[in-house]
Image (cartoon, rainbow, N blue to C red):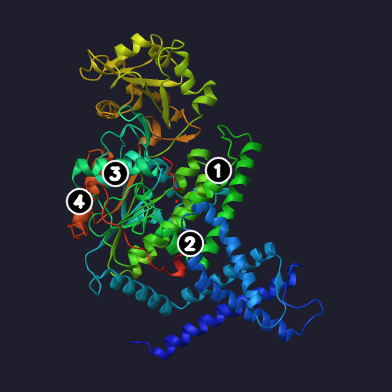
Amino acid sequence: MRRPRWRTVGGALIRVVAVWAVSTLTMLLLAGVLPDFRLQSADGESTTRVAITAALGAGAFGLLSALVWPVLVRALLLVPAFVLGLLVFFLNGSLLLIALRLVPVGNGAAEPETAVVVAAAMSAASSATSTFLAVRDDGAYRRRLARLADRRRRRRGAEGGPRTTPGTVFLQLDGVGHDVLREALRPRTGAGGRRRPPLMETVAGWAAESHRLTPWRTDWSSQTGASQLGILHGSNEDVPAFRWYEKETGEVLVSGRPAGAAELQRRAVARTRDGGLLSADGASRGNLFSGGADQLALVLSVAARRGRHNRSRSGYFAYFSDPANATRTAVSYLAEVFREIGQSTRAKLRREHPCLGRGGLYPFVRAFATVVERDVVVAAVIGDILSGRTAVYADLVGYDEVAHHSGPRGRDTHQVLRGLDRAIKLIAKVTEHAPRPYRLVLLSDHGQSPGETFAARYGLTLEELVRTGRAPGAGREPVVLASGNLGLVSFPDLPGRASRELIEERHPGLLGTLADHPGIGFLLVRSERHGPVVLGPGGAEHRLDTGEGAADSPLRALGPGAEEAVRRTAGFPHTADIMVNSAYDPATGAVHAFEEQIGSHGGLGGEQGRPFLLWPKELSAPVGEGEELVGAERVHRVLRRWLREAGGPQVPVGRIPVHRGVVDESLPMGDLPAPFAVGDPGMLDKTQ
C-alpha cells in the first residue's frame, strides 16, 4: 500500500529537524569547551539568546554547505585529490566563519584554526545523525534508494521497471594473491586459544556457501598494467613490464601514467578491433583502462584528456559535493596518515626486517590509496548498481600500496584486508535494492612476493651492477629500468633488438657479470644463431626454440609455466635487449625487487604470479577439470563468457573510436545516498 504523502513529508521534516538539533547541540557543546570559540559577548548573554545564536548558526552552516559546497568542489577538481582531502577542513571552517557572521543575533566568533575543528565536528555529527535515522527507518531507507535508482534510470533513458537479467560487478582486489586470500578466509586463533572470525568474514562466507575460489597464473609481467589490459581489453601483447624503453621514440613508456595508459589502450583496441569487456552498458571505476565502458570515473587512460567531455574525475565531484561525505573521508584520511606514522615508527623500534623508510609524502599517499580512492570507487559502484548497469569493473588498490612498503603479510596489510571486506559487504548489501539481480565476482590482477630489496641485500642497484660490467666510455649509457623484481637493460646506441653476440662484442663482461651475480636468477637475450636464450649462473644456457639446455635451465626453479611465459615475452617487439629476473628462493618465496619495495611483483618468482578468481557457483567453471587458468587474456575470455551467460546486451551502447581506444565520454555519476559514503583506492599516477 502506498504511504500517504503527508507521512512521507512529515518523516523528512522530522529528520531535518533532528539533524539541525544535533548540530545546534554540538555547537553549544564546543562553545563550552573550546576557549577560542564563543557564542556570546564578553559581558555574557542570556541562555536563550545563546541557544538562538547556536540554532541560527547551525542552520546557516547547513544551508551554506548544501548550496556552496558543490560549487567549491567543482572549482577545485583540477587540484590533486590528496590535496583536496586536506582542503576539506579549511573550506568547512571558512563556511562556518561566514555562517557566524550571517547570524543577525548574538556575538558568535571563532579563531580560524578553531573554526576548522568546530566545522568538522558539526559535519560529522550531522552526518552520523542523518545516517542513523535513514538506517533505522527501513521504509524511508528503501524509498530513498528506489527514488534514487528511478531518477538515474530516467536520466539515462532506460525503460522503467525491474529487469530480470542479472548484472555483473567485477571487484579487483589489487595485489591480493591467492594464498593471502585463503589465509584471510580462515578462522583465526586468538589469545588463550579463543576462536576468532576470519579477517575477511564476508568473503569467507561467500567462499563457503555461494562462490568458488581458484588461482590463475599471470604472464611474466605480473603487474597491473599487463594484467588489467589483458583482462579488460583482451590483449596484453607487447607489454614486457610496467615500464620500458622504446628505441624508435627514445622514450620510456610507463603504464601507470595517463599518457602511457592511453597509448597501451589504443594499441590493444587497434589489435583486437574490439572496445573491451565493458562495451555493453558498462562502467569502469578506479582502473588503468576503460574497458570500453561508457561510464568512467578515476580511469587513468583518459585522465590526461581535457575538456568538458572528460568525466574521468567526475567521481570526485559526485562524492565530495556532499560536505558530510567530504568531512567523513577527510577525517578518515587524517586518521590513516597518523596510523601509518605510528605503524612505521613501531616497525623501526622493533627493528623489523626487511624494512623500508616510510617518511616524506608516503603517509599521505597511503592514506589516499586506502581511504579517499576506496571511498570514491565504492560510491561509484553503488551508484552503478542502483542505476541497474549491466557490467561494472572496479579496482580497489589499497592492499597493493601498503604491501609494497610493509610486506604482503602483517598487521598493516591485515587492516587493509578488513577494510576491503567491509567495502565488499556494503556493495553486496546495496544489490538488495537494485532494479535487477547482481552477480558479484572478486578477482586480483597479481599477487605479491616478499623479500629484501636488491640494493639493501647486495649494496648496489641494478644500474650500478650494469655499469660495473661495461668498459668505461663504451658507447652511450644504457637505459636500466625496474618493474618489481624484473629489470630491463636497453642500449640506445644499438639499433633494434640488440643480439647477444653484439652485446658481447660491445660489452664483453656484462652478460657474465649479470648472470653470475647471486641476486640474479636468469637473463633473457636474443641470439642471432639460436633465437631467444635464457642465461643462468655458471654458464647455464637454455635455448628456448630448440629446448637445448632445458635440464639445467634456471627456469626450472620457478615452477610450471615459467618457460612458456618467458618464450611469449621473448617475441614482443619492445622486449628489452637484456631482461633480468631477480633470484628466487623456493623455500621462503622471497625475491629481490630492483625497486624500493619489500613486497613486490612484476617478474617471476613466488606468489606474485598467482592471483585469484572468486565467482558465483551458478556461473560456469573458468576452465575444465584439471586445467590451469593461464594469462590475463584467457581471464578476459572467461569474464566475457560469464557476461553472455547472464544474458545481458552484447551490442556496445556507443560507438568505439578505435584510433582513440575509448568509447564516447561518460556521464557524471550523479547523486549518491549518504548511508553509502563509507570512509577508505590509487593515486592519479597509479602504482603497479
**Direction from residue 418 to residue 172 in the image, left or right:** left
| Above or below, 626 relative to 392 | above
The residue under the point 50% across, 73% down is 67
Within-10-Å neighbours for mark 3: few <14, some 14–19, many 20+? many
Mark 4 or 2: the one toward you: 2
Residue 292 percent across, percent down from the top left: 26, 52
Within-10-Å neighbours for mark 4: few <14, some 14–19, many 20+? some
- Image quadrant holding the C terminus, namely top left
The residue under the point 22% across, 12% down is 529
Tell me the CA gap for discs 3 and 4.
Answer: 22 Å
The residue under the point 44% across, 18% down is 466
Amino acid type, label 4: Arg
**Direction from residue 465 to residue 549 in the image, left or right:** left
Amino acid type, label 1: Tyr
Q: Is residue 668 visible?
A: yes
Q: Secondary structure at mark 4?
A: helix
Q: Which residue is mark 1?
A: 362
Most extreme residue toward the front is 307
